[in-house]
Amino acid sequence: MNTELMTALDMLEKEKNISKEALFEAIENSLLIACTKHFGKADNITVEINRETADYVVLAQRTVVEKVEDPALEITLADALKVDADAKLGDTVKVEIKSKEFGRIAAQNAKNVITQKIREEERNVIFNQFNEKIHDVATGIVQRYVGKNLSINLGKADAILNETEMIKGETYRPTQRIKVYIVEVKTTPKGHRILVSRTHPELVKRLFESEVAEIQDGTVQIMSIAREAGSRTKMAVLSNNPNVDPVGACVGLNGARVNSIVDELGGEKIDIINWDDNPANLIRNALSPAKVVSVFADPDEKTANVVVPDYQLSLAIGKEGQNARLAARLTGYKIDIKNETQAAVTPGFRMEDYMDDEEDYEEEYVEELAEGEDN
């Protein structure tokens, strides 16, 4: 048993997470290359390695001839009989080649082949590890700027945070630890390339999944999410347990859960709303914190007409239209918002067509007017 070689292979397999089979193949290839360098060819040479003992043998097939013209391919009958007592002219015999016969350059080339194979396998292992983490979150350490992009160390590999995937206004310092969303892992001529993001909506989703136990066990589901990175996110959640409040679960005691995510995202505001299978109710929730008088949703056209109190119009639309824009992305509906004054002068508009329960509306509207006067 080749104890020294087997020990070295075991260490490489454990430390580098490289399969022993790949290492055996690297040794076989390196020996074949050494033979090619030494003899000029290796077409008639085979390498056999015992996977259990790591003992190896290099065999060359040579034809038995009276007079040898090519030592790499031919052998005399006298020499052949030393290998095979039954050999005769014209037969093919396998002759063992001792590795010590290789020249210094051939041996060095063999060593280089093994080293290169180990590096390739190590990169492949890392690639496969991160390939399994696509669409997941990883913690990275900021290293340096590469042009306008940022190099992020993820432990065993470096990732690239492109300028377009950075949160606007966010600054990064060397050695700073940040959460990133793994967007893509691909192979390029220069090696494997890992692309990450800080702006992807799924980053917020994954952060909640890691922070909220009820999401991890499936009690609460994130049904939809819309985000404008660095500014605001809207997220709709649904509870599969009537005794669990999905919004409360995501917010946490005194806002502990949501605040930890807000801090990770540099103060980005997060609105968490209840999901509703009824499009009108979902749109009403999505326009929070604005109060909504009525909603008429067309599921076929994916459009919705919304009426809000006069004093709530600017809040419903939001700064530069952000609230309405995020609500539209969250629900998948094109939303047209009018205040009551605008709706009243719209041809064909009738409030009763929009109302599910006129008495509830009147009661809610009186409360809203009172809140508006107080404010």
Image (cartoon, rainbow, N blue to C red):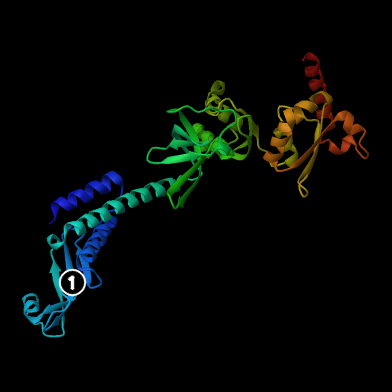
**The C terminus appears in which quarter of the rendering?**
top right
**The N terminus appears in which quarter of the rendering?**
bottom left
| Quarter of image, res 22 | bottom left
| Quarter of image, res 318 | top right
- Residue 14 coordinates in the image, percent (x, y): 26, 46
Q: Is residue 240 visible?
A: no
- Residue 271 coordinates in the image, percent (x, y): 64, 30
Furthest residue toward top:
374
Q: Secondary structure at mark 1?
A: strand
Residue toward you, 190 or 238: 190
The residue pinned by badge 1 equals 60
Q: Is 283 on the left-hand or right-hand side of 266?
A: right
Residue toward you, 256 or 359: 256
Above or below, 181 against 293 in this view is below
Q: Is 162 on the left-hand or right-hand side of 233?
A: left
Residue toward you, 36 or 21: 36
| Quarter of image, res 309 | top right
Check disc 1 and give the amino acid type.
Answer: Ala
- Residue 158 coordinates in the image, percent (x, y): 42, 40
Q: Residues within 10 Å of mark 1 (few under 14, many from 20)?
A: many
Q: Is 58 on the left-hand or right-hand side of 258?
A: left
Above or below, 38 against 365 in this view is below
- Residue 166 coordinates in the image, percent (x, y): 56, 34
Above or below, 261 against 127 in this view is above
Query: Which residue is painted at 18% across and 73% down in the image?
Result: 72
Residue toward you, 293 or 219: 293
Q: Is residue 77 visible?
A: yes
